[in-house]
Image (cartoon, rainbow, N blue to C red):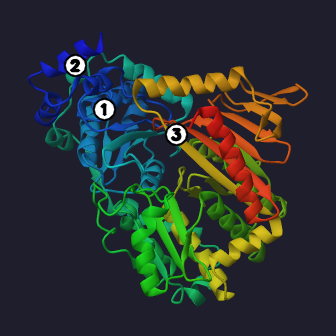
Amino acid sequence: MSWKEIYQQWANDDALDPRLKDQLANLKEAELEDAFYAPLEFGTAGMRGILGPGINRMNIYTVRQATEGLARFMIKQGLDVARRGVAIAYDSRHFSQEFAMEAAKTLAYNNIPSYVFESLRPTPELSFAVRYLETFTGIMITASHNPPEYNGYKVYGEDGGQMPPADADLVTSLIREVDNPLTIPVMSEQAAKEEGLITMIGEEIDQAYLAELSKVTIDQDVIDQMGDQLKLVYTPLHGTGKMLGEKALQQAGFKEFILEPEQAVADPDFSTVKSPNPEEASAFEYSIRLGKKEDADLLIATDPDADRLGAAVRMPSGEYKVLSGNQIGALFIRYILEARKKTNTLPEDAVILKSIVSSELATTIAQSYDVPVVNVLTGFKFIAEKIKEFEVDHSHTFIFGFEESYGFLVQPFVRDKDAIQALVLLAEVAAAYKKQGKTLYDALQEIFAEYGHFAEKTISLTMSGQEGTAKIAELMKSFREKTPTEFAGIKVEQTEDFKQLIRKNAAGETQKITMPPSDVLKYTLEDDSWLAIRPSGTEPKIKFYIGVKAGSDERAQQKIELLQAAINEVTGN
């Protein structure tokens, strides 16, 4: 059917949710076309979109459709699988709680039990709950750090990691079999609870998660000595982080932390920030103000579903510097390796995992401790898959994983990035350096002095709607058809195409890349700088990643600027 026919189907449905019907009546034709031209994309990260009526929007009907596809997938695996059920959690966004219950009611109609958190919870706790309850899948209603007009739906596998590509593809095909999302039947919430098909969960899972969280601490002596001296400001940016973050810090032994009071309140409009994204310096405005007032050593922010963590450290001037995800990762790796070496807890077969677009500083630090770093595709599910692989073949012991986009995992009782774990460990890192009379800013300068000045930058270009999707595809096609031989006058030494799974050097010699295919291109330059290009899997964006190494920070930033100018020239920005 054409988008106009689908629109009429919705407009003529007398049973359509009244709120959506009112919104539908006020949309202009261009807005209607964007809302109905194609179904909301469901990929390995689930789906994410703007709230509103239409098949290309997040609403109760697209949530039901996705859940119906998931239910059919589970039933195909057998009755024993279906009976294991689904764990469901949600964040502080508009309609998150409603969407969670719509998913549960859809599953109930298919005779699949669900375990729904009684109130909002962090994404990492949902990952943990899947493993703890031994459900077959999990659903997290969240749009992570997107603006308030967004919501999303993430699906987790039985290992607690995001659903792997092969399973996600099958779920997608089953979702697409549902012709009309308006006709999907659901069981009433009351009936589902009476029949034991919806069970509300909460405190038991919280306590079990917190018990596991105690394993994140590496050197308890440091916290015992410094826990009442480290001054920490923590902001959950109106999201789920307060739910467990406060308890986690107290449990570890930190006594001098302060919650940013306005941003500790769950708020679906994220009213104190332009964007609830700890990657952006503007998200720290309130905590910087409070930090200066309290003379805080460290400021930490978590995104609305508490899977990403950002930090700002105090500089000698008294001002605060917001760190990049790569810099936080470097601080973690240096501390973990040094502390585990000191406490004799560094396994001989230790391994660190990171994404292909994360800093090579991590690799350089790890090599100095004879610990290998394994690169995986972007997406924390690939880190989770490697952890599972190592558990099966006993080849390595996982000790840390991270992505440059502020995702960190310390202990694998969770199989997704976990900002609550990172919150506790970063406080420990700061306490250890304060014991030496140093800040985390000092610690970072020591790392640069020892290993070189690494710098990275991510450039995100938003290209919305049908035109944007086509433009992103055209850009990727253009880079593949006209392989660059240099950027900013620096020769390309190696090109990696993770979609075609080919690695080619400047002489034209090729190797096979042994990873799942992914629409990513990466170029390594003769001065060890690198660039990568990939469309976002969750937003209408194409991302360009730059990584450089130099003898000074000034020279590193000059390299970044030159390479960014080269990218701007190619993209016309």
The first of marks 1 and 2 along the sequence is 2
Secondary structure, mark 1, is loop
The kind of residue tagged 2 is Tyr
Secondary structure beneath label 2:
helix
**In contact (CB < 8 Å): disc 2 and disc 3:** no
Which quarter of the image is occupied by the N terminus? top left
The Cα atoms of the two marked residues, 3 and 1, are separated by 21 Å
- Identity of the residue drawn at 48% across and 31% down: 43
Contact check, label 3 and label 1, Cβ < 8 Å: no
| Residue type (three-letter) at the residue carrying disc 1 | Arg
Report the side of 437 relative to 290 (left or right).
right
| Marks 2 and 3, the one that precedes in the sequence | 2
Where is mark 2, residue-wise? Answer: 7
Q: Which residue position is annotated with label 1?
A: 57
Task: Find residue 487 and report its image quarter.
Answer: top right
On the picture, is 108 further left or further right than 362?
A: left
Residue 354 in the image: x percent, y percent? Answer: 67, 50
Q: Secondary structure at mark 3?
A: strand
Q: State the residue lying farthest toward the left.
A: 14
Report if residue 563 is visible in the image: yes
Q: Nearer the viewer, residue 276 or 62?
A: 276
Residue at mark 3 = 461
- Vertical relation: 123 (above or below) 137: below
Residue 122: x and y in percent read: 40, 56
Q: Which quadrant is home to the C terminus?
A: top right
- Residue 563 in the image, given as x and y percentages of width and height: 71, 45
